[in-house]
Image (tube, rainbow, N blue to C red):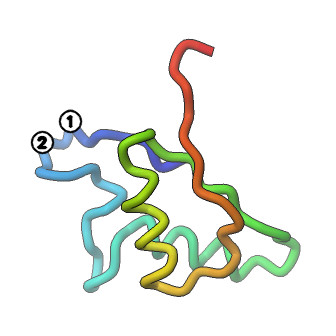
Amino acid sequence: VAGGSGKRMGAAMPKQYLELCGVPILVHTLRALAAWEKLDSIVLVTAPDQITFCEEMVERYAIPAVSAVTSFAFGL
């Protein structure tokens, strides 16, 4: 799940999108997961207004293990 807002951190953007060594933290995480040989695919769950941003990030950083980007619903 990549749906945090980063409000407590006080950053201009959610912390999962902040860069570490020039690459978003979320991409580091997705790459680490994708390297796990027992993994079939990753479904990336994010806030509804961040779906397009995440889809573009997955494409830009070529993470084929991500099979879908979807949103979550609060209050389930």
Q: Amino acid at mark 2?
A: Gly
Instruction: Say which mark, if any, is on residue 43.
Output: none
> In the image, is residue 12 above or below residue 22?
above
Q: Amino acid at mark 1?
A: Lys
Q: Which residue is mark 2?
A: 10
Count of picture labels? 2
> In the image, is residue 43 above or below residue 59?
above
Label 2: how many Cα within 10 Å (few below 14, some 14–19, many 20+): few
Residue depicted at 49% across the width and 46% down the height: 46
List x then y, in percent, for residue 30. 57, 70
Q: Which residue is mark 1?
A: 7
> In the image, is residue 72 above or below residue 50?
above
List x then y, in percent, for residue 24. 34, 72
Residue depicted at 33% across the width and 80% down the height: 23
Confirm or deny contact between disc 1 and disc 2 (CB under 8 A).
yes
Which quarter of the picture shows residue 63? Answer: bottom right
Q: Which element is circle 2 on?
A: loop
Alpha-carbon span between mark 1 and mark 2: 5 Å
